[in-house]
Image (cartoon, rainbow, N blue to C red):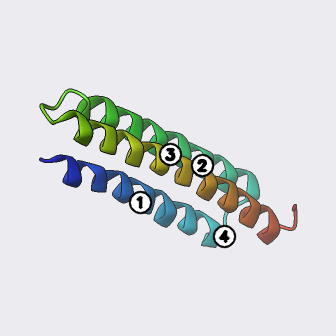
């Protein structure tokens, strides 16, 4: 696996979070359960990205590739946090709590 493929795995993790969180928004469950599930999904994906970054840091790539992967991971974590906030707000609106 090269650095470009590795960086793409962060996008896959964000997409998986978005799909699962969207499912929580559309389910008929309670607000508290959906909020807890979205928080769990966020923690799980954040940990996953951090663990992937740690594993990729041990790869024998050029320094510029390591910097690029680190930058993509930082952007992925920021995007994940923004999506998490948006899903929390959307959930509150759907359940008339926001």
Secondary structure beneath label 2: helix
**Image position, residue 21 (x, y; %):** 55, 61
| Residue to which mark 3 is pinned | 77
Secondary structure beneath label 1: helix
Residue at horizontal 32 percent and vertical 45 percent from the top: 68
The disc, 1 or 2, on the residue closer to the chain's N-terminal end is: 1
| Distance of label 1 from label 3 (alpha carbons) | 13 Å
| Residue to which mark 1 is pinned | 16
Which quadrant is home to the C terminus? bottom right
Q: Residues within 10 Å of mark 4 (few under 14, many from 20)?
A: few
Secondary structure beneath label 3: helix
Q: Does residue 28 appear to the left or right of 5 in the view shown?
A: right
Nearer the observer: mark 1 or 2; the answer is 2
- The image shows residue 88, relative to residue 41, as above or below, that is below
The disc, 4 or 2, on the residue closer to the chain's N-terminal end is: 4
Circles 4 and 1: CB distance less than 8 Å? no
Q: Does residue 16 appear to the left or right of 64 in the view shown?
A: right
| Distance of label 4 from label 2 (alpha carbons) | 24 Å
Q: Residues within 10 Å of mark 2 (few under 14, many from 20)?
A: some
The disc, 4 or 1, on the residue closer to the chain's N-terminal end is: 1
Residue at horizontal 61 percent and vertical 46 percent from the top: 39
| Distance of label 3 from label 2 (alpha carbons) | 6 Å
Residue at horizontal 67 percent and vertical 63 percent from the top: 29
| Residue to which mark 4 is pinned | 28
Q: For the view shown, which residue lies furthest in the front direction?
A: 64
- The image shows residue 76, relative to residue 50, as above or below, that is below
Between residue 42 and residue 64, name the one nearer to us.
Answer: 64
Secondary structure beneath label 4: loop
| Residue to which mark 2 is pinned | 81
Q: Does residue 70 appear to the left or right of 24 in the view shown?
A: left
Nearer the observer: mark 4 or 2; the answer is 2
Circles 3 and 2: CB distance less than 8 Å? yes
């Amino acid at each position: 696996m090269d650095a470009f493929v590795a960086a793409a795995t962060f996008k896959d993790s964000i997409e998986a979070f978005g799909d699962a969180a969207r499912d929580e928004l559309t389910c008929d469950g309670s607000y508290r359960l959906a909020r807890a599930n979205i928080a769990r999904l966020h923690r799980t994906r954040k940990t996953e990205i951090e663990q992937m970054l740690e594993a990729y840091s041990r790869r024998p790539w050029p320094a510029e590739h390591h910097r690029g992967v680190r930058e993509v991971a930082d952007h992925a974590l920021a995007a994940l946090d923004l999506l998490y906030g948006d899903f929390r707000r959307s959930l509150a609106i759907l359940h008339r709590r926001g």
